[in-house]
Amino acid sequence: MNKKTIGVVGGGQLCLMIGESIKDKDLPYRLIAVDPTPNCPAYSFLDDQLVGDYKDEEQIRKLGNSSDIITFEIELANSKVLEELRKKGLPVHPSPDTLRTIQDKYTQADFLYNSSIPVPNFESVSGKEELEQVISGYGLPLMIKARKDSYDGRGNFVLRKDSEVDGVLSYFNGREIMAQEYIPFDVEISVITARGVNGEISIFPVGENVHGKDYNILEKTIVPARVNKEIIEKAKGIAKQTMESLNGAGVFGIEMLVAGSDVLINEIAPRVHNSGHYTIEACQTSQFEQHIRAISGESLGNTDLISGPAVMHNIIGLDGQTGNYQIMFDNSQIIGTAEVEKGVFVHNYGKHEVKPYRKMGHFTVISNKGEDQEDLIIRAEKIKEKITIDNGGK
């Protein structure tokens, strides 16, 4: 069987899990990637790695010359060069135009607003005077975001006091910023959604996101989200409307804020998403297999849960941890992916070194027969205590 080549901008943990999906399902594809780190996390699943930055024009063009389809695992990909490749006839999914819209958070919010999709109120801010005007109109607290080159909560700042205005402008150090109405939300949810090149749309079970207390990074995702049926249906409707508006093929992670009966889009990731990692073990089709199906023109797979509730928990570097490390479960080293207990799966991303608040892996716990969701959540917390990053005592 002739295998098609998928070129990926980024060879990190998301590309790694795409590679695992290809291997586990014996799919007729091979992978090559551009990534700045030699022997990147996905390296063992690649036929070739081109060492270069996500914006490296020369290396991305080389990637295009060797690929049948191009995709990306990170929003920092060079949309200009991807558009150049698309115009030459190479399929690029999601489309460079969609990537460009999402790369600028103000442009993203403006697009959604003009598509009649609910988002928090927002304004572009170009300096202190404009920021003070927005504060006067919206009040405090206020969410300040870097418009470009930020993801996973990086580049966000909650402005709580007038006295912090100079500090926040210094924090962003001349970067383009936007102000967004601060929403005192009840819960954040994620809707992992796929759209095929033929327009077919498929939605995974809605997940509930919990962020770390000491860092603005996803800590865990609980599936299904603990919200009522009306909120679930509203969220799915918003996700479907978003995918129809963007016309982007592939898997998207759509983060939403639930405040009472209101559901608002916070941000969109035009790629497979951290909050969808639970799908690997918990769903009939993982988000990674679904992404391949979506960008290659195949029909989309079944997204139903296999055995009921699930909890995905990130494994994150602690403050002060740097350098060599091992991920341990009950004092046993985890390499790659391992089922460490029945229904408990640990994924080691194989990054070269640990850093504070860096995602080093994740684990997913799926429910035992008859186990309800709250008991599963408690069990996941107990599993968490057994998983450590051994950094030589650092």
Image (cartoon, grey):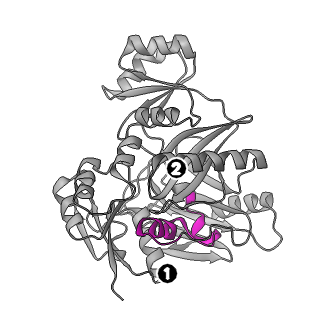
Q: Is residue 148 above or below residue 1?
A: above
**Residue 269 image point, x, y percent:** 47, 49
The residue positioned 67% from the left and 55% from the top of the image is: 222
Quadrant occupied by the C terminus:
bottom left
Q: Is residue 257 left or right of residue 46?
A: right
**What residue is disc 1 on?**
24
Q: Can residue 50 be seen by looking at this rendering?
A: yes
Q: Is residue 234 left or right of residue 43?
A: right
**220 and 184: which one is in front?**
184
Quadrant occupied by the N terminus:
bottom left
Three-letter amino acid code at the position of disc 2: Glu
Three-letter amino acid code at the position of disc 1: Asp
> Which mark is drawn over residue 244?
2
Bounds of the magenta segment: 276-299
Q: Residues within 10 Å of mark 1 (few under 14, many from 20)?
A: few
The residue positioned 57% from the left and 21% from the top of the image is: 141
Q: Can residue 394 be seen by looking at this rendering?
A: no
- The mark that comes first in sequence, 1 or 2, is 1
Q: Among all residues in the image, which is located at the extreme right? A: 370
Q: Nearer the viewer, mark 1 or mark 2?
A: 2
Q: Residues within 10 Å of mark 2 (few under 14, many from 20)?
A: some
- Majority SS type along the magenta span: helix
